[in-house]
Amino acid sequence: MKTGQHPTDQSRAIRMSLIFAMALATPTALFAEESASGKLSLWGMIQQGGWAMYPLGLCSLIMFFLIFHSWRETHPRRFIPSEGIDEALAHLGAFRIQEGIDTLKRSPTVLARIMEKSLRRIKPEAPQVNKPKAEATLIEHLEAEENAIGQWVNYLNVVGSVSPMIGLLGTVSGMISAFQTIGQGGMGRPELLANDIGEALITTAAGLIVGIPAMLSFFIMRNRLTATVVATSQLASDLLDEIPVNVVFEEDIPGSHEPE
């Protein structure tokens, strides 16, 4: 475990803290303000939005969590170690399988996990099929890693799809209330319709405000995950190519006699 934090990580953490503080401070100031012209404050608009603003607020919190989590999980350093690749290539080229695994495992990355599973599939008694077995295991575990991370990215798509629907439901609710007000004699009094129409419009806008960033983030994170997985797959193939299929030392593969 690292005892210190890289300066870039420190500055990034400071920037994120400042942004988070500003995000907390800005709504507080807006909640407290009431315009002299009679316009609603942000808090007043949220209150006027009615019941739909509560699930939309929850969707917005989920969206922010998914964006930060997906950004962290799809970072290239989560997949590929920043050092030790050349050393691992040298070990594998010399048939030192365990040393190559240990070198990669210094950094807890996706590449280290899939290469460990793949290299342990190499059997000395059938060298001609070593590489196909290793490649099949590599693809299997890489797909598993991609799916495990991709599910969080897919949740962004869910939020982006559901939020406008919740806003539309709030719009329908507001219009129903408006027609009920008209039926009760409010046709000639527009001030009685203001709250209902405001609810209808505010919930639609709130749903789009949450849904649009969620959908944009989904496509960005999905493309980032795909690019990182492709780079990891190519590097893993290069590592496997360093191992000649005709010579493998059994003692370099722990548990090689364990039944599959």
Image: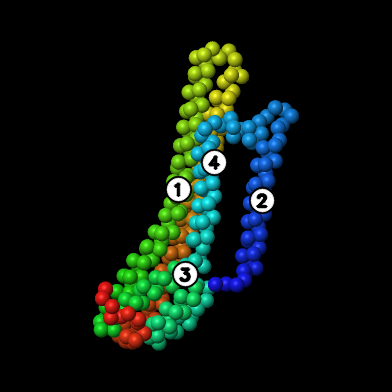
Q: Secondary structure at mark 2?
A: helix
- Residue 259 at x, y percent in the picture: 26, 76
Residue tagged 1: 157
Compute the Cα span from label 1 to label 4. 17 Å
- Residue 224 at x, y percent in the picture: 48, 59
Residue tagged 2: 21
What's the residue type where badge 1 is placed? Answer: Asn
Compute the Cα span from label 2 to label 4. 18 Å
Label 4 CA crowd tier, 10 Å (few <14, some 14–19, many 20+): some
Residue at 48% over, 27% down: 173
Q: Is residue 233 above or below residue 166?
A: below
* Near-viewer residue (209 or 30): 30
Q: Secondary structure at mark 3?
A: loop
What's the residue type where badge 3 is placed? Answer: Thr
What's the residue type where badge 4 is placed? Answer: Gly
Q: Earlier in the sequence, mark 1 or mark 4?
A: 4
Q: Earlier in the sequence, mark 1 or mark 2?
A: 2
Compute the Cα span from label 3 to label 1. 26 Å
Q: Earlier in the sequence, mark 2 or mark 4?
A: 2
Q: Is residue 251 left or right of residue 217?
A: left
What's the residue type where badge 2 is placed? Answer: Ala
Q: Quadrant of residue 147?
A: bottom left
Residue tagged 4: 57
Q: Which mark is residue 109?
A: 3
Q: Earlier in the sequence, mark 3 or mark 1?
A: 3
Q: Earlier in the sequence, mark 4 or mark 3?
A: 4
Label 3 CA crowd tier, 10 Å (few <14, some 14–19, many 20+): some
Q: Is residue 179 above or below residue 251?
A: above
Mark in front: 1 vs 4: 4
Mark in front: 1 vs 2: 2
Mark in front: 3 vs 1: 3
Q: Secondary structure at mark 4?
A: helix
